[in-house]
Image (spheres, rainbow, N blue to C red):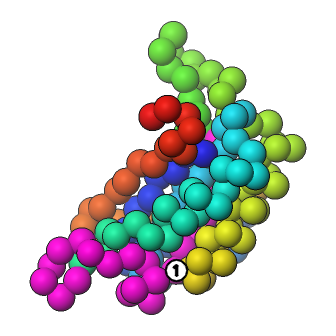
Amino acid sequence: MRAVVQRVSQASVRVAGETIGEIRHGLMILLGVGTADDEASVEPFAAKIAKLRIFEDEAGKMNLDVRDVGGSALVVSQFTLYADTRSGNRPGFQLAARPEQAEGLYEAFCSALAGWGVPVATGSFGADMKVDLTNDGPVTIVLDDAREGR
């Protein structure tokens, strides 16, 4: 799994002009599922993100996680995180999981993150989505499942 995690003061996602997911203070998570991912990938990745200390404590140090600050997460599926641009100018997506595999793992990730006490809003898997956010900091972290060797 691969994720772009942003600390936000607000984030929302719209499909066909309708807001379907929205949070205030918390995490905007763009989540990609790769061909090597399976159920065993989900729980450790969700735990890592739930425990990611990127919120400031009273001393101004990034020492708190999203649960410590009463934040939420907006999770949006993003297969393009697996784009391979090493050859040519048109990205290839051979390492991105097929929708049949990715959708179940995306949903399992959202459930696992909620299981860690993080309120979760979502996009619509496979839909053409419009995402709006205010990056706080800005703080943006890119995470790869350790099993990918990155």
Using the image as rendered, state which of residue 57 and residue 132 is in the foreground.
Answer: 57
Circle 1 — which element?
Answer: strand
**Is residue 78 a member of the stretch shown in magenta?**
yes
Using the image as rendered, state which of residue 140 and residue 117 is in the foreground.
Answer: 117
* Residue at numbered disc 1: 72
Q: Quadrant of residue 19?
A: bottom right
Instruction: Name the residue: 49% across, 64% down.
Output: 49
Using the image as rendered, state which of residue 107 and residue 85 is in the foreground.
Answer: 107
Residue 142 position (above or below residue 24): above
Left or right: 3 in relation to 140: right
Instruction: Name the residue: 57% across, 38% down.
Output: 147
Instruction: Name the residue: 58% across, 63% down.
Output: 46
Residue 8: give x, y in percent of width and height: 39, 71
Instruction: Name the residue: 38% across, 87% down.
Output: 69
Residue 35: give x, y in percent of width and height: 72, 33
Screen quadrant of the C terminus: top left
Q: Residue furthest right?
A: 100
**Is residue 69 a member of the stretch shown in magenta?**
yes
Residue 142: give x, y in percent of width and height: 41, 48
Q: Amino acid at mark 1?
A: Ser
Residue 129 visible to an observer of this rendering? no
Residue extent of the magenta highlight: 57-79
Residue 90 position (above or below residue 52): above
Q: Quadrant of residue 6?
A: bottom left
Left or right: 47 in relation to 35: left
Left or right: 69 in relation to 15: left
Residue 126 position (above or below residue 107): above
Residue 60: give x, y in percent of width and height: 15, 79
Left or right: 80 in relation to 88: right
